[in-house]
Image (spheres, rainbow, N blue to C red):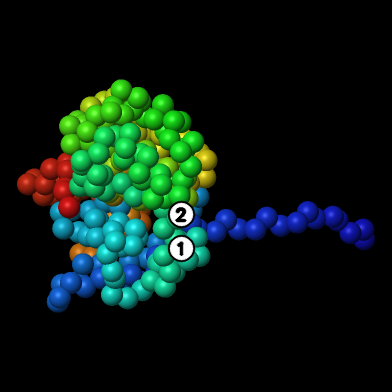
Amino acid sequence: MGETEQGPKEAPVQPLLRVASLQQRIGRRAVLRNVSFEVFPGECFGIFGLAGSGKTALIHILAGVDRFTSGSVEILGHDIGKTEKFKQYTGLVTQKRSLFQDLTAGENLDFIAALKNAGREAIPPLVERLALEDYLKTPVSRLEAGVYQRLSLACALLNEPRLLLADELITGFDLNSRRLILDELAGYLERGGACVWSFSSMEFAGLMSRVGWLENGEITVYSPQAAGEKWNELERSSSPLSGEAHA
C-alpha cells in the first residue's frame, strides 16, 4: 500500500480568555459562585442576568479592577492574579462615566493614548469611524450620552486590545450612536478581537456568539436563541418581570 501524504495539522484555536471556578464573596454574601467559561477570537460573549446578579462585578474582575476570592482568570495565558501584563491586551468600557470630566474629548484621547503607550496615529481612524470630529474640543462633561459612549469606546480601543470588556455598552442611546458603536464592534471582531459584553436588555442577545446567564451567582452558557427562549418563558411565568433587568 502506498503512503498518503498528510499536511500539518492545524493547531487548535486557543481562547483569549479562560475563566475557571471563579468565586467572589463580599462578607458573607457570595456574589459569584464557580463561574467558568472561555472566549475565543472573533467572539462576542454576552453576560446577562437580573438585577444584582453580578454582571458588573464579573466585568470588573476581568478588567483587574475588583478582586476575587478563588478560582482563576487567564487572558492570553496571563494569570491576572499574578501579573498585570494582561492589561496591555485589554480595553474597558464602563457603565458609569469614567473619562476625565475636566478635559475635552480630544484631550482625553491624547492623554489615554499616552497612558496606554499607544501611538497618536491610532486616534484619527477611531475619530473618523466613530464620528467624533465635531466634539474634539467639547468638554467631556457636556457630551450627550451616545457621543460619550462613542468616545469611551474609542479610548478603549486605542491600544488595539485583543479583548474588549464592555459593561452595558448600549443603553438608550440615539440610533446614530448605536449604529456607529455596533459597526465599530463588528469590525473589531472581524479583525480577531474578542468582546465580553454585559447587557440588561434581551434585544441584544442576537448580537452575541453565546450568552452567559448569571443567576444566583452561577453562570449557564446558552446560544442566543436559547437565551431568548428562556427569557420569554420567564416573562410568561412572572408577569412583574419586564424586558429589561438592570444590575
Question: Mark 2 highlights which residue?
Answer: 89
- Depicted 3 relative to depicted 172: above or below: below
Residue 34, numbered label? none
Can I make out residue 53 in this image?
yes
Can you see residue 45?
no
Q: Residue at x 55, y 59 (%)?
A: 14
Q: Quadrant of residue 153?
A: top left
Assess disc 2: are there few (<14), some (14-19) or many (≥20) residues with their C-alpha within 10 Å of its C-alpha. some
Read off the residue under disc 1.
Answer: 85
Nearest to the observer: residue 18 or residue 94: 94
Residue for point 17% across, 41% down: 243
**Going by the picture, which residue comes out furthest to the right?**
1
| Residue 64 position within the rendered picture, expressed as x and y whole percent measured from the top left | 33, 62
Residue type pointed to by label 1: Lys
Name the residue rendered at 17%, 32% in the picture.
Answer: 142
Residue 50 on image: x %, y %: 18, 53
Disc 2 residue type?
A: Tyr
Horizontal placement of 11 versus 222: left or right?
A: right
Q: CA distance from mark 2 to mark 1?
A: 8 Å
Element assignment for label 1: helix
- When the figure is inspected, residue 159 is found, relative to residue 70, above or below; the finding is above
Looking at the image, the residue that sits furthest to the left is 240
**Mark 2 residue element:** helix
On the image, the x and y values in percent for residue 103 come to 25, 39
Instruction: Choose top left, top right, bottom left or bottom right for residue 182.
Output: top left
Q: Residues within 10 Å of mark 1 (few under 14, many from 20)?
A: few
Q: Position of residue 241 (x, y in %)?
A: 11, 47
64 or 176: nearer the eye? Answer: 64
Do tag 2 and tag 1 residues touch (Cβ < 8 Å)? yes
Q: Residue at x 25, y 67 (%)?
A: 32
